[in-house]
Each structure stands twice: as structure tokens, then as C-alpha cells.
Image: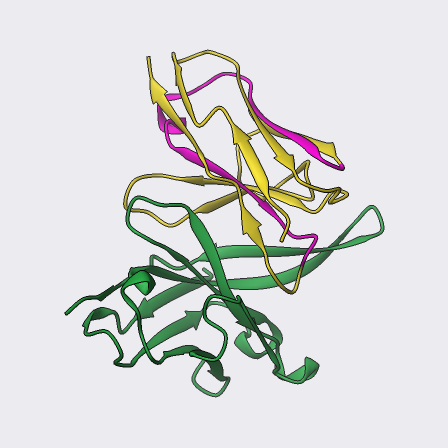
Chain colours: A yellow, B green
Amino acid sequence: DIQLTQSPSFLSASVGDRVTITCRASQGISSYLAWYQQKPGKAPKLLIYAASTLQSGVPSRFSGSGSGTEFTLTISSLQPEDFATYYCQQLNSYPRALTFGGGTKVEIK
Amino acid sequence: EVQLVESGGGLVKPGRSLRLSCTASGFTFGDYAMSWFRQAPGKGLEWVGFIRSKAYGGTTEYAASVKGRFTISRDDSKSIAYLQMNSLKTEDTAVYYCTRREVTMVQGLRIPVFDPWGQGTLVTVSS
């Protein structure tokens, strides 16, 4: 199975900060990567698919980039509602063995 | 509004069975593949499996961890997807989510998109 490694696993930041989360794949996955946001007790919410396409309704301060094995999720100016855990997901193996990164928890500094 | 609502979770003993339901509204259910994911307490996300639409044979795919024990089915007349879980193990304890899958074209690539997700239902396997 393709492994995804997210870094950092924990991030402390202030409102207004620019935040970058990295996701590395154990083998090339082209642009078959999605990013999700999850708040405590809630379902994951799709933010970005195809590595860089913003899902409808998601604020433009979120952006994604990358291809192959290295990907980033950037929040240009962190807002109070952005404190959450973020997961990357690879879809290169679709329809089998879809895997997620271990998550990055973004907390208030 | 597109909505998915899971139900059927609860406490069950190891070795027993449980069936989860995912009731959909706000879209033509039969046109979409549906998928199940899970999240153990305090852990990350794990794909469980999915079922294609009838137009693509209604066939299923499963994660290795549940293959042979879990079965996904669908009733398009009721807009419900099911997850039948047999021979449950303690490690199956998790919140189970259903999602709608659609495929979109991005720069020549067919990209599967899992959205939206239901609110989840908790399954606890314990003696």
C-alpha cells in the first residue's frame, strides 16, 4: 500500500499566521491527493482534491500544491475556525487501498 | 441540500454482527457510488470499502482488514447504503462514516471525490 507521511504532526500557530502542512507519498501518485479538515466530534470536510482544486464553498485562504510524491496544504492567514486536524488522502490506488496521512493537529498558540 | 445520515451503531460483543445504514437525501442516490470509512477513537481515518452504482454493476471493493467479514449493499428505491459487519473484532471499534463518491475530470485525470460525509455512527465492540 502507498504510505502517506504528514509533517508536522502537531502545529501551534496564531490567528493570522501562514501555515503549511506537508504530505509525502511513498511512491508517485500524480495529482491523486485530497485534503480534509476535521474538528473534534465532527465528520471530515473535503477542502481540496486533485492536489490543488478547491472544493466549492471552501475559503480561498486554503490552497494546495504538489505532484508526484510531495504535496502541501497552505492556509494563508489562519482564522479561529481553522483550528482542527488536517488529513491528506491518496486516491492513486483507487478503487482499492485508499490511505490517509496520520494527520496534523493545528492548535492555538 | 445533499445529506447523509448514518444509523445502527451501538455496543456489540466480539464475534457478533451489526448492520449500519446510510440514508441519503438531496441527490439521485442511484447515480452515485457510495463509500464507507471509519475512525477508531483518537486515531486516523481508514477506508472500509465502497459500492458502485447499478450502472457500473453495483460491485464492491473492500479494505484488506474487513474483506470477507463486511458486506456493502444498497437499496436505490430507499436511497440507503448498508454496511453489514460480521465476526466483529475489538479492533473494529470506531466511528463509521458514509460518503458519496463522484468522479470529476481535472486536467485529463479522472479524480474520485468523496463528499459529503455523514455525521458518523459509533460502533463499540467489547465483551
Q: Give the residue displayed 53% in from the left and 66% down from the top.
A: B63
Q: Was residue A90 drawn as part of the magenta stretch in this picture?
A: yes
Q: In front: A32, or B119?
A: A32
Residue A94, image quadrant: bottom right
Q: Is residue B79 left or right of residue A90?
A: left
Residues in magenta, as a range: A68-93
Q: In front: A73, or B71?
A: B71
Q: Position of residue B13 (x, y in %)?
A: 19, 74
Residue A34, image quadrant: top right
Q: Give the residue displayed 48% in from the left and 24% down from the top.
A: A8
Vertical placement of residue B33 versus B103, above or below: below
Q: Give the residue displayed 53% in from the left and 32% down from the top.
A: A6
Q: Position of residue A85 (x, y in %)?
A: 40, 34
Vertical placement of residue B56 versus A109, above or below: below
Q: Was residue A64 drawn as part of the magenta stretch in this picture?
A: no
Q: Is residue A85 left or right of residue A23?
A: left
Vertical placement of residue B25 versus A57, above or below: below
Q: Give the residue displayed 28% in from the left and 49% down from the top.
A: B41
The residue most toward the left is: B127
Q: Position of residue A66 (x, y in %)?
A: 72, 31
Q: Position of residue B79 (x, y in %)?
A: 45, 79
- The number of numbered badges drawn on the structure is 0
Name the image quarter holding the C terminus of chain A: top left
The residue most toward the right is: B108
